[in-house]
Image (cartoon, helix red, strand yellow):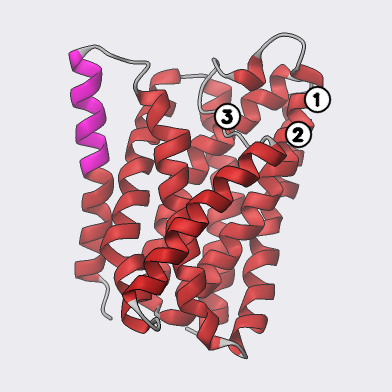
Amino acid sequence: MSALAWIIAASVCGGVLSVLCAALFALNARAQWVGSLVSYAIGALLGAVFLDILPEAMETGSSVAAISGTVLAGILLFFTLEKLLLWRHCHGDHCEAHERGVHGRSGMMIMIGDTFHNFVDGVIIAAAFLADTHLGIVTALAIIAHEIPQEVGDFLILLHSGYSRAQALRINLLSSLAMLAGGTLAYFALQSVQSTVPVLLALAAASMIYVAVADLIPGLHKRTQLHDTVQQVVLIALGVGSIYLIGALVPE
């Protein structure tokens, strides 16, 4: 299976299938399911970063210091983007985007940010598969894991903004196609500039760290009971464990 075929398949799974799964969760409106998905996604993201993406970037990059500096700059970049574009991913019913008075503009604002995010995820998937098929599979899994709870949040925001269920599903599906566009365009662009792949992997690591630490983990702190905390820790560990198992089972 060629790198391009892997990129297309992973982009479709990460985009379209995650939207369809998210729609099922959102229509059933089971908040505990979303919370469980978020905890698992944190583990998958951090596991992919520290077990696969960063080691690969440091192995193929010019120096460890350069890769570490790129990760640091990337975290600052994503913080700045979130501030400038109001790029906030909601994973439940209680967040800024759900407050009264902002429903009308929050839906379209979230989808603009989500379309950009999907495009970047496609670029990340392409960079990972161009570096190594095993790394691409792990990266795609981590992206899919965090896409589903994110899309649940987006779906709920659109419903709160006055869109019908059919309209919300249609808009989310159109937005998800940006991942396929990003992956396909990046494949042809990066083919001729392979030296940029380690830098993109470092930026991918920064993106995943930022999403996990700034967007997902704060939401878990709202549930403070011991049972909830134990459940969160177990699911995060399962997310990390999934990445580790894939690394062990998928040949280099």
The reply to whether dot 3 and dot 2 touch (C-beta < 8 Å) is no
Question: Mark 2 sits on what residue?
Answer: 109
Disc assigned to residue 105: 1
- Find the distance from the CA under tag 3 to the CA under tag 2: 13 Å
Please tell me in which quadrant of the rendered image residue 191 appears: bottom right
* Secondary structure found at label 2: helix
The reply to whether dot 2 and dot 1 touch (C-beta < 8 Å) is yes
- Find the distance from the CA under tag 2 to the CA under tag 1: 6 Å
Is residue 33 visible in the rendered image? The answer is no
First along the sequence among labels 3 and 2: 2
Viewer-nearest residue: 189 or 180: 189
* Secondary structure found at label 1: helix
Question: Mark 3 sits on what residue?
Answer: 153
- Vertical placement of residue 57 versus 42, above or below: below
- Find the distance from the CA under tag 3 to the CA under tag 1: 15 Å
Please tell me whether the stretch drawn in magenta is mainly helix, strand or loop.
helix
The magenta span reads: 226-237
